[in-house]
Structures are given as structure tokens and as C-alpha cells.
Image (cartoon, helix red, strand yellow):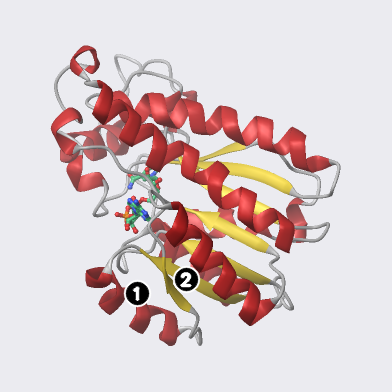
Amino acid sequence: TGSLMAGKRGLIMGVANDRSIAWGIARAVAAQGAEVAFTYQGEALEKRVRPLAESIGSSLVLPCDVADDASVDAAFATLRENWGGLDFLVHAIGFADKQYLRGRYLDTPREAFLQALDISCFSFVSVSQRAVPLMKPGGSLLTMSYLGAERVTPHYNVMGVAKAALEASVRYLAADLGGIGIRVNAISAGPIKTLAASGIGDFRYILKWNQLNSPLKRNVSIEEVGGAGLYLLSDLAAGVTGEVHHVDSGYHVVGMKAVDAPDI
Ligand code: NAD
């Protein structure tokens, strides 16, 4: 434990269970003295999120479905009543109908496209619209992306397109908000076995591929993403905005593996 985040209050959106990337970030910032509030989507998840929140001394646990503006408004209204201000926000939310996270991108119907882009990309804009008025200079916004935004990865399809739009949103929001001292960044995480990831076709193969072909020859943990999240949310990253920071065992730098590269 330390005090990098002492005196800072943050909202963490996207914890579903103790395997969630958002939970890795929550633990990392709480261990450095941050006070944290959580949102969850739907009653079924409240039963999982509330005990996790309580385990790190947090009692502000609010429902929020980002597809519903009234729900987002209500969550931020409650946050304002309780805290008055906000120092950081973590957006670790994504969704696409898993029927289209396999097969060809070509076959994506409009409805699935719009839903994936709405929940996985526009929601970051929407929550930022409500978070920014609560922030003062030094505020930090963070979202979660994946390599499928930059390159074709199997089955990621419409999520890859949504993440590309999300990464572009990070850059535009960074430019919008830099003048008032608010930073906006993303972490591009390597594959991690979570609830959301289980919807992606052949996910076990993707994990194995990254393990065998990344420079570090292993997959990353939510603790490691948490460490990078802590950095980007803290004043250590005061000069960093508009960035997409890879936490992926270095996989994004690999073009091809050598013929004689030893297997594990
Ligand atoms: P997760 O299932 O633990 O978290 C996804 C969260 O999104 C859940 O808490 C879910 O409730 C929330 N969500 C979905 N629709 C919502 C809605 N309408 N309103 C509010 N919340 C909603 O999985 P995760 O892997 O921790 O995902 C977190 C983020 O990390 C996602 O953006 C995901 O795309 C991204 N990511 C994941 C991986 C991976 O391999 N797991 C890699 C890179 C990026």
C-alpha cells in the first residue's frame, strides 16, 4: 500500500465479478489510498459487486445501464450528492451480441453494429459528458481497448470496429479536455479470461496464441492492467493524454515469429 491516490475519488464502471479488469484497477487505486465508487449493470450483478466494493471499504455502489440515459443521469446525480466532485473515472464496459463475435464481420447486421458501437464506444462519451463537470484540473478518464481496434484478430469483428471508434474518441476527448487539465487515455489489454471475453469465438485459442507469441511469452493479469491503470489515473502520468497504452506482454510489437524461435 501507498499514497499515490490519497485524497482522490473515482468512479469505476464495469465490475461484473472478481475477474473483471475494472476490479484489477479498483484494487490497485484503492491500495494507494483512492476512495472508490462503483456502478453495476442489473440486479444480478449487484450481488457480486457490493461485497467486492465493501472489501475495499467502498459503500457507494450504484446501478447504471449505459444504454439508458436516465440510468446514467441517476448514477451521476447520486454521485454528485454524495461526493460533490470526482477526480477520476474508469470505463471498462463493452458489449456486442455474441452471435456476431464469430464468423465474418461482413455479416454484421445494423442492429448489432449500432448496439456494439453504442455500448462500447458512445457510452464513454456519454459518461465523460457527466463526469467532466464534476472534475477539476488534474482529472483523469480511462477506458479499455484491445488490439482488434488496430488490426484484424479472429472473431473480434464488430467489437474491433467499436474499439477503433473508442480509441479515436480518446484522442478527440483528450483534445477537447486538455485545456481544462483533464486527461483521457486508454489501456489496450492483452486477452484475459473474463465474462465479456467468454463471448468471443475461440477465446482459448487467442489466449494460447498470445502466450506463445508475445515477447514476455505469457498472458497478462488484471493486477498488471491495474498497475498501468493506477499510473494513468495518478499524477505520475500528469503529462500523458490521448494515449493508448498496451498492457499485452508486448504482443502488439510482434510482426512475425522466427522459424527457429523455441516454443515454451
Ligand atoms: P467483464 O465482463 O468483467 O466486464 C464487462 C463489463 O461491461 C461488465 O461489468 C458488464 O456489466 C458491463 N456492461 C456491458 N453492457 C453494459 C451496459 N449496457 N451498461 C453498463 N455496463 C455494461 O469483462 P472485461 O474483460 O473485464 O471487460 C472490461 C473492458 O475491457 C471491456 O471494454 C472489454 O472490451 C475490455 N477488454 C477486455 C479484454 C479481455 O481479454 N478480457 C481485453 C482488452 C479489452
> Which residue appears at 43% of the width and 80% of the height?
53
Of callouts 2 and 1, the N-terminal one: 2
Looking at the picture, how far across and down is residue 210, in whole percent? 31, 35
Query: Which quadrant is the C terminus positioned in?
Result: top left
Looking at the picture, how far across and down is residue 82, in whole percent? 62, 81
Left or right placement of residue 4 versus residue 229 in this view: right
Q: CA–CA distance between discs 2 and 1? A: 8 Å
> Which residue appears at 50% of the width and 67% of the height?
75
Query: Which quadrant is the N terminus positioned in?
Result: bottom right
> Which residue appears at 35% of the width and 60% of the height?
20
Q: Is residue 264 visible?
A: no
Looking at numbered disc 1 in the image, what kind of residue is underneath it? Val
Find out whether the residues at labels 2 and 1 contact each other: C-beta distance under 8 Å: yes
Vertical side of 14 occupied by 239: above or below: above
Examine the image and state in which quarter residue 216 appears: top left
Q: Look at the numbered disc 2 and say if its residue's Cβ is closer than 8 Å to ligand 1.
A: no
Examine the image and state in which quarter residue 259 appears: top left
The residue where tag 2 is placed is: 38
Q: Give neighbour class at mark 1: few <14, some 14-19, many 20+ (Cα, 10 Å).
A: many
Left or right placement of residue 18 versus residue 21 in this view: left
Looking at the picture, how far across and down is residue 35, in whole percent? 61, 78
Looking at numbered disc 2 in the image, what kind of residue is underneath it? Phe
| Residue 151 numbered mark, or none | none
The residue where tag 1 is placed is: 49
Vertical side of 79 occupied by 262: above or below: above
Total numbered labels: 2
Vertical side of 176 occupied by 254: above or below: above
Q: Is residue 102 visible?
A: yes
Residue in the foreground of this view, choosing between 188 and 158: 158
Vertical side of 228 occupied by 81: above or below: below
Residue in the foreground of this view, choosing between 244 and 89: 89
